[in-house]
Amino acid sequence: MGFWKDLLIGGAAYKALKQSSPPGIVAPPTCTIVGMKHIGLGSKWRIYYIKNDSPNLKRNFTISKGTSGMTSGSDKWKFHWN
């Protein structure tokens, strides 16, 4: 039982460590970031944002470590990882 308990505690500690270092995000001027959520045990993040011309519609996308940028239509996003 001790091995499984140690494994579970180690997994929780790893997830807490990853949550403490979110990516830096440079949003395009037409968008506003409204939230971020860590996904799973790896370095995946879900980014929630709104477009300034339609603030009632919340949108999202998922990024993982190594993603340095993304283009969505005319919007260009940049990501900086620690």
Image (cartoon, rainbow, N blue to C red):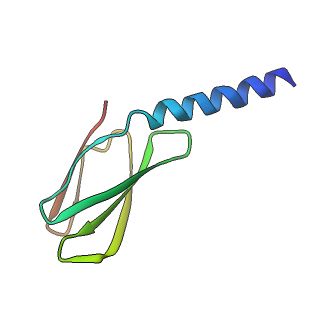
Q: Name the quarter where the C terminus is drawn.
A: top left
Which of these two is toward me, 78 or 58? 58
> Looking at the image, which residue is at 45% across and 39% down?
43
- When asked about the image quadrant of residue 66, the answer is top left
Residue 34's image quarter?
A: bottom left
* Quarter of the figure with residue 28: bottom left
When the figure is inspected, residue 28 is found, relative to residue 21, above or below; the finding is: below
Name the residue rendered at 46%, 37% in the picture.
19
Residue drawn at 27 percent across, 68 percent down = 50
Left or right relative to 6: residue 21: left
- In the displayed structure image, the side of residue 19 where residue 23 appears, left or right: left
Q: Quadrant where the N terminus lies?
A: top right
Q: Is residue 69 above or below residue 18?
A: below
- Is residue 28 placed above or below 82 in the rendered structure? below
Residue 3: x and y in percent read 80, 22
Residue at (55%, 45%) from the top-left corner?
Answer: 40
User: Which residue is outermost to the right?
Assistant: 1
| Residue 29 on image: x %, y % | 12, 60
